[in-house]
Amino acid sequence: MRWIWLAPVIALSGCGVDVGDQVECRCTEDMLDEFASSCASETGDPANPLSTRLPDCPSGTPIFLRERTTPFTVLFNVETTITNFSPNQYMDQLTDDFLFVPDPGDIALHPEIYDAPPNYNPALDTLWAWQAERTFVRSLLDQERMLKIDFARWYESSKDEVIISEDGLMETYIFPYEIDFQEKPVDGVSKAFGVKGRVEVDLVTPTTENPVWAISRIVDIRDAATAKRSFGELRAEFAQ
């Protein structure tokens, strides 16, 4: 039997939740105390993640995000949650069966992270799934370490490619990315680094009538012409 608890929440500005509202959310390590005794420990039915999945319980004041009624708003939300250090709300943009597919070069660079089997096939083999992404983004967006994150390049509708499935339930967005990170000073020295490459992002919705889009897969392609890290390298570095 699956138990779900209803947790009373505080007012969440800009999120459409008022005092006294009842919401379902998933237990997390850094959630607000209000949810500690009444959160849900299960994630829902993995066979239908978009219709039953629970968001992580809030860990602080939520930021305002757009409704996930189009793939573009999900990509916009990804940028917003990362630059505003909101890992729980970032994870809400992903399906529970989310996959990250690293570039083959990063698999070779980091075999301790991407434990690829012999004859690895990215269409069949899973190297990085939802839980790994959750651990990564919590580490990356740790405000005890990171000071600032800026997106120099992300999806631009006037420049980038979109592939729409015949049934309209999946759209693939292909675009370059470039993101700059600045860490907090340690002994008076602040480190800065960046990532650059290209991604293919699959977004899915269970229906076209009242769509709720989420990212189901990100395929990373390294930029051989840059000295900056790729998404695959970034994940390997912040995997623990």
Image (cartoon, rainbow, N blue to C red):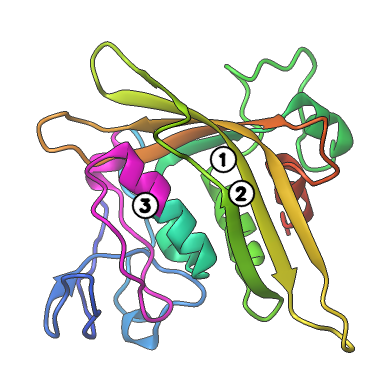
The quadrant of the image that shows the C terminus is bottom right
Can you give x and y, in whole percent of width and height, for residue 43 in the image?
36, 52
The residue that label 3 is drawn on is 43
| Res 96 seen here | yes
Query: Mark number for residue 214?
Result: none
Contact between marks 1 and 2 (CB within 8 A): the answer is yes
Location of residue 8 by image quarter = bottom left
Instruction: Using the image as rendered, state which of residue 119 and residue 237 is in the foreground.
Output: 237
What residue is shown with label 1? Answer: 129
Q: Residues within 10 Å of mark 3 (few under 14, many from 20)?
A: some
Q: At 78% across and 59% down in the image, what residue appears?
A: 193
User: What is the secondary structure assignment of the residue under circle 2?
Assistant: helix
Lateral position of residue 139 relative to residue 117, left or right: left
The residue where tag 2 is placed is 132
Residue 61 magenta-highlighted? yes
Residue 53, horizontal then vertical, whole percent: 30, 49
- Residue at 78% over, 42% down: 113
How packed mark 2 is, by other alpha carbons closer than 10 Å (few <14, some 14-19, many 20 or more), is some
Q: Alpha carbon of mark 3 to alpha carbon of mark 1: how far?
A: 14 Å
Tag 2: amino acid? Ala
Residue 93 shows in the view: no
Discs 3, 1 touching: Cβ within 8 Å: no
Asked if 60 appears above or below 220 in the picture, the reply is below
Q: Nearer the viewer, mark 2 or mark 3?
A: 2
Q: Secondary structure at mark 3?
A: loop
Q: For mark 1, give the secondary structure.
A: loop
Question: Depth-wise, is mark 3 or mark 1 nearer the camera?
Answer: 1
